[in-house]
Amino acid sequence: MGSRVKGAADKIMENFGERVLKLSRINLGRTYQGTRPNGKRYRKRIDNSGTLKRSLDYDLKMRGEDGRFVAGTIVFKMADYGRFVDQGQKGTKSTYRKSKKSPYRRKKQPPSSFLEKWVDKKIKRIQDLESGGFVKKTPAKVKSLAYLIGRSIKHHGIEATHFFSQPLADETGLAMDGTRPSGGTPTLAQVLSEAVGTDYANAVAQEFEILE
């Protein structure tokens, strides 16, 4: 009986972790519609390089060092900047609607050297703000555009995507604010309760950690 219970809990937790990662990776590969500070809509892919997608992982600990079965802990991991991509950042002057609940706030501009490399690689044509026409892509123009992008990020922050937090909430049967919506999917604790018992399920649910 004991071994059957352990196997059931292991499988449920593993399936949970894999499902959250799968949905998060799908979100990272999608093209989504964002909103610029001026209200204009634009389309972009969250993770163009695939670096963030490849960094997603989780650790699952279901047994103590002595090998005995204990309340499980699942720790989701990702590249450090992933938390800003997911939760967004508040700006110094305004904040995107999706980022208003973010615990992160932008205090200064991103490094110019990083943005200049990004502009040089990603931006094919540079548009003149006064004439509206396209101008030659020179080092000076790249530097100027990188500065303007950095200033915008500082002032307005980064728009949240919830590429990870939404799948996590969905898979635990919770809303984004941590409450359970009526008629929603069963919580992880409820699923575990049916398989291994209420006491153990609640112990597992209380041990969740999100590594930021």
Image (cartoon, rainbow, N blue to C red):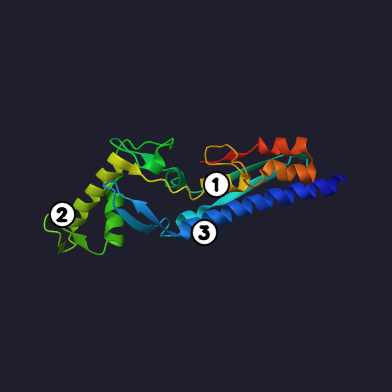
- Total numbered labels: 3
Question: Is 45 left or right of 182, judged from the image as shown?
Answer: left
Q: Residue at x 26, y 64 (%)?
A: 124
Give residue 130's position: percent from left, percent from top: 12, 54
Q: Which mark is residue 26?
A: 3
Q: Is residue 109 visible?
A: no
Which badge, 2 or 1, comes first in the chain's sequence? 1
- Find out whether the residues at labels 2 and 1 contact each other: C-beta distance under 8 Å: no
Which badge, 1 or 3, comes first in the chain's sequence? 3
Q: CA distance from mark 1 to mark 3?
A: 16 Å
Q: Residue at x 73, y 49 (%)?
A: 10
The amino acid marked with disc number 1 is Lys
Question: Is 23 left or right of 16, judged from the image as shown?
Answer: left
Q: Residue at x 58, y 37 (%)?
A: 179
Q: Which mark is residue 129?
A: 2
**Tag 2's secondary structure?**
loop
- Find out whether the residues at labels 1 and 3 contact each other: C-beta distance under 8 Å: no
- The residue wearing badge 1 is 77
Q: Residues within 10 Å of mark 1 (few under 14, many from 20)?
A: some
The amino acid marked with disc number 3 is Ile
Give residue 126's position: percent from left, percent from top: 20, 60
Give residue 119's position: percent from left, percent from top: 27, 57
Question: Is 150 left or right of 71, judged from the image as shown?
Answer: left
Q: Residue at x 15, y 59 (%)?
A: 132
Q: Is residue 5 above or below residue 177?
A: below
Give residue 15's position: percent from left, percent from top: 67, 53
**Tag 3's secondary structure?**
helix
